[in-house]
Amino acid sequence: MELHDLWFVLIAVLWTGYFFLEGFDFGIGILTRALARDEKERRVLINTIGPVWDGNEVWLLTAGGATFAAFPEWYATLFSGFYLPLLLILVCLIVRGVAFEYRAKRDGERWKRNWETAIFWTSLLPAFLWGVAFANIVRGVPIDADKEFTGGVLDLLNPYALLGGVVTLTLFTFHGALFAALKTLGDIRERARRAAGVLGLVTAAVAVLFLGWTQVLTGSGTSAVAVAVAVAALLGALAANRAGREGWAFALSGATVAAAVASLFLALFPDVMPSTTDPAWSLTVTNASSSAYTLELMSWVALVFTPLVVGYQAWTYWVFRKRIGTQHIPEPVRH
Amino acid sequence: MDIALAPETLARWQFGITTVYHFLFVPLTISLAALVAGLETAWVRTGKVKYFHATKFWGKLFLINIAMGVVTGIVQEFQFGMNWSDYSRFVGDVFGAPLAMEALIAFFFESTFIGLWIFGWDKLPKKLHAACMWMVALGTVLSAYFILAANSWMQHPVGYRINEANGRAELTDIAAVLFQNTTLVVVFHTLTAAFLTGAAFMVGISAFHLLRARRTPAAERDGRKIAAMRTSLRLGLVVATVFGLGTALSGDSLSKVMFEQQPMKMAAAEALWETESPAPFSVFAYGDVDKGHNTVAIEIPGLLSYLANGDLDSEVPGINDTEAQLKEQFGDTAADYKPIIPVTYWGFRWMIGFGMASFAVAVAGLWLTRKRFWVAPEKRTGSEEVPRLMLTRNTELGEFLTTWAWRAAVLTLGFPLIANSWGWIFTEMGRQPWSVYGLFTTADSVSPGVTQAEVLTSLIVFTLLYGILAVVEVRLLVKYAQTVPVHEEPPAVDPTLRGPGTGGTGAGGGDGADTDADKPLVFAY
């Protein structure tokens, strides 16, 4: 395997890590509205991800930074091309982070409600927009001979991409519901399981449609295998949820996320951003990548530090392994 | 197109606004992480409750601050691609590497261990809990190192070659990028200034509490609160003094490096139009840019020669000669090889002025609030009393001066923030017209495919959003800065990793109905 192929895989791994982890915390944010009946229950949900959401989000920053280092042309075309959707995602992530940290810092009713509204929308919008963005990457966008994106924001809102957005939105919400079932106690745990049952079916319907469409557009034999794994894992997650095996259900919805991301990257390879204007102008793993020296250097860095990161992040999840119920929520701070 | 709304101008304003804003939080995060870790360690080691209260108090302010630092940092990672795509294409091979290292090595560290620290009070043994904050502190320092190495490469590119086939810069020597002298002195200068910033923040807020305590009738004063704030004040003063001196020394080293690597920046910092030997340091000047000289100038003879070369009589090249030389070197292509002189000139002065003002306050405060050294026994104060400001062994500062000394201490908390902002504005504006000095211009760096409307939209959105968040953040800080949590008791039992009990049997499951398992979390969002 050549280094730029390895880096294609590593970028896929980083996005998989990001969608696996922030996928469920987006889901939790979305479910604060539908699943929780009162403020205490909303706090139960928020606190299941409290210690970890920030670490989850760094997977995105690392995916961004690694793309910059390993595929500068991809980084440049992608983020200047998808300008306005990315702006919206950034605004959401800014407000969302502040919302988690500041919501409980004052006791005012309006203060809390406003931040809760913010948590809902700033979880929902990126969950949808990442799907739109990735669908467009796979489908291809207008790119000229100078590797510049020549389309407008309306080019990004095509039916295929919008369906991609619906898939990530429903899949992350499903994944979040299973996380809630795994991490909470009492009533809300039951409701999370029931919600997951419904969400899983909706996700399965749209995901099969979308991944099938992807196969028709640009699929390969290997991506077909990944699609099959994704669908099987999704059905497995549904079955495990029905059987009350919460750990398995969550692990399998995570596997669905991973296999779905893998199928998209496999469908994409060896392009990284196909041009719909002229296939000769597509960005590929070869023409968008860094020099061999940089790729080799970054490979060593990734090889040493990625396992370390996975190790201490896993330890964090172990430290906060206890389920949370309404009885664990302390009284709000009085200020 | 109107130059004021040209995409390059808009993109530069956006970068300036988002970066200066981000950097208000960065130095506080770097320094407060280490200071809070130090206070917590002091509590763990001595068991003194004043350290516990100080840890809780500064920890809360730290968290309000780091939340803003983290979220505004996300924009930094992506806006190179958004607004500066041609820059990203040109430098990605070199510049992307330290950025990716920063994310993988430093950001994960910070974000993971800060989560453990915030929520871990009842989950982690206290030594491990304190260690988590040290990890956060290490993460912030590593993060600073990588991003400053990337910036230093823009100031002074090394360890690269230009690939003739695609016209891009390619990395040939990562060690040269990470360890060149520009990187080392910039890291030294930025970190010392960061600690001066956090220490001044500590001095300002503790002085506010002590000043308020002085005005409270003796019977109503809370000794525990005074003890925590007095300790914080002394810690802040010591750190501000040591790192204030470090900032001055590192600044001197940095200016010598810059005189060599970017003579134009330093000539512009001084509005030194003509080459002079010996060159004077300008205290005040008003220039006529079009005619290329100053109409008013107040100067200290020889000092600039010292800053540049370490002696009092050597030659320092002026703006006009440097520009002629740059035109010869790079061709007469760029419209202008000089930055905006009033910005660099005043930016340089405000950086030094505000930074050194807080250093001066710290030195004075360190002397005035000393506890025992050369203070008459009857003038000494206990750890639960507001310190007397002792000028000499027996002389206390008068009432009027004492009040103003405390006020100056409160005010100093803002000084380094102003100094830091101007320092960055100076160093980035002073490099213009280049984005990578001598290699690539800022005008060539912008995204060709991004429309004026898009850049304008994001500029307005970020400015408004950051404005609103500034109001929210400052109001929270003010509120939390006013309450020292003396009612909070240190945990009676040191938690164990196995579970909340005493590490006994079956504590892992958590489904049990015993009271221990149902105990509320010590901290929750």
Image (cartoon, helix red, strand yellow):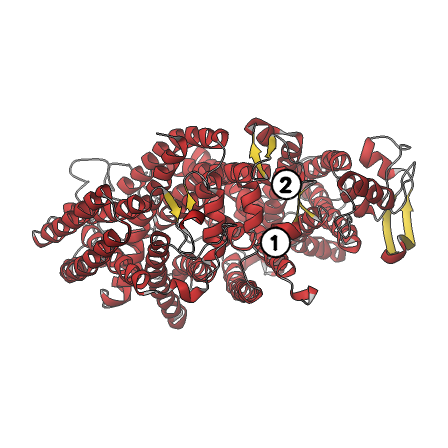
Badge 1 density bin: few <14, some 14–19, many ≥20, Cα 10 Å? some
Q: Quadrant of residue A103?
A: bottom left
Q: Residue at x 54, y 45 (%)?
A: B89
Taking depth in this image into account, of B405 and B350 the one nearest to the observer is B350
In the figure, is residue B98 to the left or right of B294? left
Q: Looking at numbered disc 1 in the image, what kind of residue is underneath it?
A: Val
Marks counted in the figure total: 2
Residue B180 place in picture, x, y as percent = 63, 29
Give the numbered dot on residue B154.
2
Whether residue A144 sits left or right of residue B493 in the image: it is right
Q: Position of residue A147 (x, y in %)?
A: 49, 50
Q: Secondary structure at mark 1?
A: helix
Tag 1 subunit = B
Question: Does residue B117 appear left or right of residue B397 in this picture?
Answer: left
Q: Quadrant of the N terminus of chain A?
A: top left
Question: Which element is circle 2 on?
Answer: helix
**In whole angstroms, how far apart are the C-alphas of marks 2 and 1?**
17 Å
Q: Which residue bears the numbered disc 1?
A: B20
Query: Could you say which is closer to the camera, residue A250 or residue A260?
Result: A260
Q: Residues within 10 Å of mark 2 (few under 14, many from 20)?
A: many
